[in-house]
Amino acid sequence: MFFLNFAGLFLDLYELTMAQVYYERELLGKAVFSLFIRNRPRRRPFFLFAGLESFLTLLKRFKFEDSDLEYLESLKLFKKEFLDYLKGFSFKGTIRSIPEGTIFFEGEPICEVEGELISAQLIETLILNTLHIETLIATKALLCVIEAKDKPLFDFSARRTHGISSSLHVARASYLAGFSGTSNVLAGKIWGIPVVGTMAHSFVEIFPTEEEAFKVFAKTYPERTILLIDTYDTLKAAQKVVGLKKFLEEEKIKLKGVRIDSGDLAQLAKKVRKILDEGSLKETQIFLSGSLDEVEIRKLLKKKTPVDGFGVGTRMGVSADSPYFEMGYKLVEYEGKPCFKLSPKKELLPGAKNLYRVWNEENRFLFDLITLREESIDLSSYPKSENLLKSVYQDGKLLYLETLETIRARVKEELKRGYKKRVKISKGINRLFKQLKSKV
Amino acid sequence: MFFLNFAGLFLDLYELTMAQVYYERELLGKAVFSLFIRNRPRRRPFFLFAGLESFLTLLKRFKFEDSDLEYLESLKLFKKEFLDYLKGFSFKGTIRSIPEGTIFFEGEPICEVEGELISAQLIETLILNTLHIETLIATKALLCVIEAKDKPLFDFSARRTHGISSSLHVARASYLAGFSGTSNVLAGKIWGIPVVGTMAHSFVEIFPTEEEAFKVFAKTYPERTILLIDTYDTLKAAQKVVGLKKFLEEEKIKLKGVRIDSGDLAQLAKKVRKILDEGSLKETQIFLSGSLDEVEIRKLLKKKTPVDGFGVGTRMGVSADSPYFEMGYKLVEYEGKPCFKLSPKKELLPGAKNLYRVWNEENRFLFDLITLREESIDLSSYPKSENLLKSVYQDGKLLYLETLETIRARVKEELKRGYKKRVKISKGINRLFKQLKSKV
């Protein structure tokens, strides 16, 4: 079902050079790595977790094929014994993760990988890359969903996402966050996401007149005609649409809507609405697109722009105002002993962890509590609490994958809970951190 | 050799809905589409063209398989005849492009696609996506190369690029722009780009002491040891490195360098350089990484930071300060007649075009001239001029692909030519535009 025919070579070289040392020195103990986002950028009140399915699907295919091993041999860095070891490699560890579609905050452990040191180290690039892109986009898309209120949003970003696999991650992550569909046909095939789309400016230009283009298109798609009206002059085109009324009736075509893709969208939409209403096309909807994101959507709605749906492209698809998160994947425990580092601004909480979420009686968010995994915690005085980190992969076996619809439903619930950052760190962690720091 | 096992479904749905109309109405005439970047963002003095090989490689695989057609049928939008047509589809047109590694400016036609209307329309998303990501990254990477002067740069971005295919585009585009290598092993395998990498902080944490970690690593890689020294305390670690001197001599290990990944890099590098020099490790190099881009590199060198190479990650890999370009792919001619549109801020120059570049006697850039393809132009009064748009794909056949080394060499030459935007538009185009505009 997936889209990349790569095997085990998607990694940073240092994972292999380190792994060879571990292999030779028989450093094969159990390690725990923790995945988290270090800082929260401006204009991101929280993060929305996504990418787990994509990651776990690729993880099952993370193997070294003969041609991979030949390539590695050619680097003259690796010994035969180690390459033989890689030949039989597959990830056999355990992964605990918060569910996709969960809101979270900076510094929280959102995924913990436990396994033989080499195993857990070799998947570093894969897990970071996959969870990063979808979490990045799901978070941005959710902001658009919040601002659009109940109006539908559509992912139009395929042409300017960073590569094809990115376009697929974007279509999935935005749908999961609450978008209603995508223009990306490949994503539609892979995940069953509803696909949308009608015509480009080039279509209008092909025909001798705009009316002719509109008529021909409407006849071909009588049940879902949306006409693009900004190729030459938006208002004149809206009048031409009204002029088609008789034709549409005769042909029994229901004109679903018009799309405006440029210009002052708020002003144009108001004028177009008026033209359509006066032309007895009250049910014809107006769709807007062109450089939209949550900020533009908010402005449009604040101006009471008459709009029935948004096509959201590049700015969402590359998370333009914050095109990356400081996501890290760090060793926190080896052979039962907590690990940490003190690199400036990159300090790390030691130890394998749990992440408890606490709600009040009305299911509204109270706070999160990060604890050591072994720490016993009493949250019984709160109406509802839960450890968000759940096993999704155990001893090399996939436990389950949720459907996109399940995840979408979770996101809807999340939005009712009033998230605002309130994260506590347990006494156990604080004590351990001080202890370790004093020893350096 | 490539990395995606997709067929023809990477497209926006509207390309298919339009194509079905063209098919049914027998609108099968010759169309010309032109690819260009609309505006130039701040801090981009020019663009560097890249992505042609990736695009042309994918183009050859752009076909509709049975499962694709079944999926399209399930949408209940397309008639059997059209799906049968898609079954046999492959791109049979002609593509003219400026060479990869060429500097260009906004508004210039950098690629023109000529073919049956349906053919040229269906590849819109593919051509935009592929040329966009590599041009975006090559441009950013070139700025890093310029600022780094002759110091080597390495792509460390794989973990935070937008998806796996993006990481590959980034490795290729940055190498093409003048980077010396990448940490991305898959990119190394695909294109033979030199791969680099040593150790992560987790490696240091595994061992009881930093010294022990350094020793074990050096013994395993005696010829290319680079030690990461910022896990706990950078200056103390540098002193520990000096303390290893006797061990290194006994083991005949040449310590290539140390890497600092956090903190005030300028200040730390100066202090570390002093420690190493005083410890008779004058030949041990210093590599810097951590949130670098062309701006940070310039600052570091301005402060006379002692540095021998840079690891450049996320900020280059997502072109963080400008994560997209306004790249468009627009119909400019159909059946020999020029097309255009007037959408506000998205006006388009009509007609199939040539792009002439003019140099002076010293091979320095004078100006570019955009002309109609049919327009005869006299540039004989200039010492050197050339039409940059050359056929790379003709009637469905790939004419040639350049090696990465050829492209790298071109970029080096480009940097000597003093590019600053000077673009002229021919009289023929201006006349045509006025003519068409007056008719709307």
Image: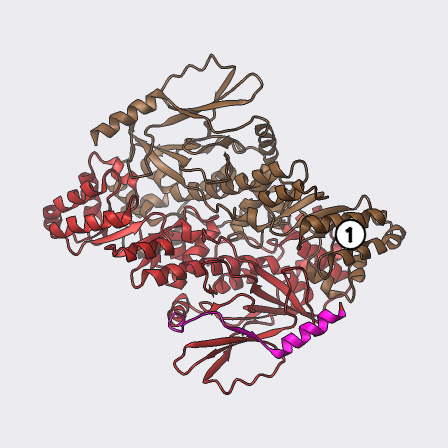
Chain colours: A red, B brown
Q: Is residue A355 above or below residue A23?
A: below
Q: Badge 1, how many Cα within 10 Å: few under 14, some, many 20+?
A: some
Quadrant of the image occupied by residue B408:
top right
Which element carries disc 1, helix, strand or loop? Answer: loop
Q: Position of residue B54 (x, y in %)?
A: 51, 41
Given the image, on which type of amino acid does mark 1 rest? Tyr
Q: Position of residue A42 (x, y in %)?
A: 48, 58
In the rendered picture of this protein, how many numbered marks are placed on residues?
Answer: 1
A190 to the left or right of A269: right
Mark 1 belongs to chain:
B
Quadrant of the image occupied by residue A63:
bottom right
The verdict on residue A358 being magenta is no
Residue visible at 68% across and 50% down? Answer: B265
For this orientation, the residue located farthest to the top is B381
B118 to the left or right of A349: left
Can residue A195 be seen from the camera position used here? no
Instruction: Between residue B294 and residue A386, name the one nearer to us.
Output: B294
Quadrant of the image occupied by residue A91:
bottom right
Range shown magenta: A414-439
Give the quarter of the figure containing the C terminus of chain A: bottom right
Q: Is residue A136 above or below residue A271?
A: below
B434 to the left or right of A165: left
Instruction: Between residue B15 and residue B175, name the one nearer to us.
Output: B175
The verdict on residue A415 being magenta is yes
Can residue B109 be seen from the camera position used here? yes
Residue visible at 30% across and 54% down? Answer: A300
Instruction: Between residue A220 and residue A224, name the one nearer to us.
Output: A224
Q: Position of residue A291 (x, y in %)?
A: 36, 48
A316 to the left or right of B365: left
Q: Is residue A149 above or below residue B277?
A: below
Residue linked to disc 1: B221
